[in-house]
Image: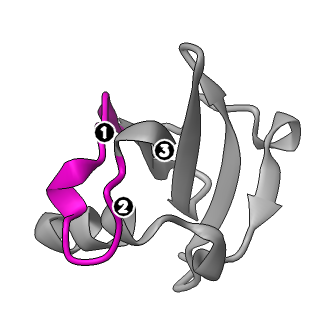
Amino acid sequence: MSKEIRVHLGQYIGKPAYIFTKDKNHCVLVEYRKDWDFGEGSPGGAEISHIVIHTRNGFHLDKFKEITIDEVPKCIIDLLTFLN
């Protein structure tokens, strides 16, 4: 199992979606609405429409752009700390 988490950016149900992949069988998808993100200190200000936790990863990640963790909105990173 890989200890590195990969992040991909794409569209899911019409909204930007960030997919965090732990290995070939497990990932977390988070939809994001930038226009509702009020910035630093207000992680609740973003509408995060869906959080989908997948086993047996069903996404074709070759259709999504791989990005660095630094490119993920801070409110999503803050939210994911609750899933520990």
Where does the image place residue 19, in percent across and percent down from the top left? 55, 49
Answer whether residue 35 is magenta in the image: no
- Do the CB atoms of the residues marked 1 and 2 lie less than 8 Å apart? yes
Q: Which residue is mark 2?
A: 76
> Going by the image, does 1 lie left or right of 60?
left
Q: Which residue is drawn at the image coordinates 27% and 65% (left, top)?
A: 80
- Whether residue 80 appears in this view of the structure is yes
Q: Is residue 73 above or below residue 17?
A: below
Front position in the image: 17 or 40: 40
- Select label 1 or label 3 by which is in front: 3
Where does the image place residue 53, in percent across and percent down from the top left? 33, 41
> Going by the image, does 84 lie left or right of 4?
left
What amino acid type is highlighted by mark number 1? Answer: Ile
Q: Which residue is mark 3?
A: 34
What amino acid type is highlighted by mark number 3? Answer: Lys
- Do the CB atoms of the residues marked 1 and 3 lie less than 8 Å apart? no
